[in-house]
Image (cartoon, helix red, strand yellow):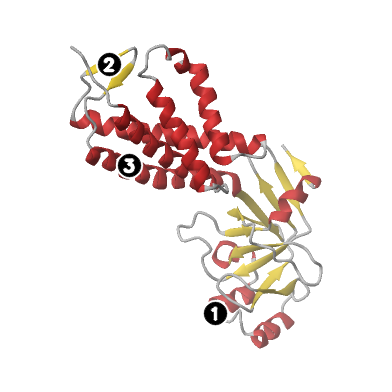
Amino acid sequence: MIKYVYGDIIFVENLLMNYLILFSTAKLTKISYKRINIIIASIAGAIYAVFYYFPGFEYLYTWLLKIIFSLFIIVVAFNPYTFKEFGRIILVFYIVSLIFGGAAFGIYYLVNGVRYSYKGIFYMESFPAKLLFLSIICSYIIVKYSWGYIISKIKREKILLEISILKDNKRICLMALVDTGNSLTDPITNLPVIVAEYEAIKEILPEEIQKIFEHNKENNLNVIASVLSRSEWMTKFRFIPFKSLGTENGMLIGFKPDAVSIEDKRSKNYVKDIIIAIYNKNLSKDGEYRALLHPEILSNYNGGKKSA
């Protein structure tokens, strides 16, 4: 039985899918791009797809040439400047292509099934516009939500670290988020600051300091000064101004611990030159972390004491 394919339909379908894949790649990688370049690359890809159905051009569709042509399309669409950037775009491009292609084929197979194949290629007798539109919507939803979830998990794995705060022979362990927006330093010593939740570290604080936070008087400087004047910790506490955490001009109470250990999968590192600022609210909605780690600490703590 003779099967007919229509070049114009193949061209339009591939042009649309190529454009969506390249556009999604640009958005996910957050690379600068020109729309005209994406259109030109999409047209080139659509022409390449049409040539498959002409006799004598089968050699263009070996695995090697397919990879080379896909790299060519990426260069035309984005003109990457570095190999690192090029590699990142390639990875995202192939992932998005698999998602779009899988969604389109899955929806078609669910509705019509596969009835004809040749040389490992599945031919669709017809691909209605409504199915194409539905596959595009499904692909967009999959890319948008699954990609965001995957990236957030990858980032969290890299920036969540377990830390221990040691003070007067007491130790508190908690999870800390490496916060690139945390640039707090002690105005007197210029030491980096870790912001920690009060509830997570209150056990290492003296009772008189706990009362300040439990009665929500940590913003009353007169009360704090009066309490500290009668406390053994008077010389250990200091005030740290900040403009974040939902407050334009705030003040945090901070203290210098005996040491802070930062632990990852490979080692445990001790830092002594650091300040702990006390925050009387939750830093994470789901309790995944209870402290904000100054990024400068990570670049410096390798010089501290290590233990296996």
Of mark 1 and mark 2, the one earlier in the sequence is 2
Residue designated by label 3: 136
**Which numbered disc, 3 or 1, marks the residue closer to the eye?**
3
Residue nearer the viewer, 42 or 221 = 42
The x, y position of residue 236, in whole percent, is: 76, 71
Mark 3 is surrounded, within 10 Å at the Cα level, by few (under 14), some (14 to 19) or many (20 or more) other residues, namely many
- Residue in view at x 54 percent, y 33 percent: 90
Q: Which disc is residue 15 wearing?
A: none
Label 1 and label 2: CA atoms lie apart by 72 Å
Residue nearer the viewer, 167 or 18 = 18
The x, y position of residue 230, in whole percent, is: 72, 82
Q: Which disc is residue 117 wearing?
A: 2
Q: Secondary structure at mark 1?
A: loop
Q: Which residue is farthest bottom?
A: 222
Label 2 and label 3: CA atoms lie apart by 24 Å
Contact flag, marks 2 and 3 (Cβ < 8 Å): no
Q: Amino acid at mark 3?
A: Ile
The x, y position of residue 121, in whole percent, is: 33, 18
Q: Is residue 229 left or right of residue 1?
A: right
Of mark 2 and mark 3, the one earlier in the sequence is 2
- Residue in view at x 64 percent, y 42 percent: 264
The answer to whether 199 is drawn above or below residue 110 in the figure is below
Q: Amino acid at mark 1?
A: Asn
Asked whether residue 174 appears in the rendered view, the answer is no
Q: Is residue 194 left or right of residue 30?
A: right
Mark 2 is surrounded, within 10 Å at the Cα level, by few (under 14), some (14 to 19) or many (20 or more) other residues, namely few
Residue designated by label 1: 216
Residue nearer the viewer, 201 or 192 = 192
The x, y position of residue 216, in whole percent, is: 54, 79
Q: Amino acid at mark 2?
A: Ser
Label 3 and label 1: CA atoms lie apart by 53 Å
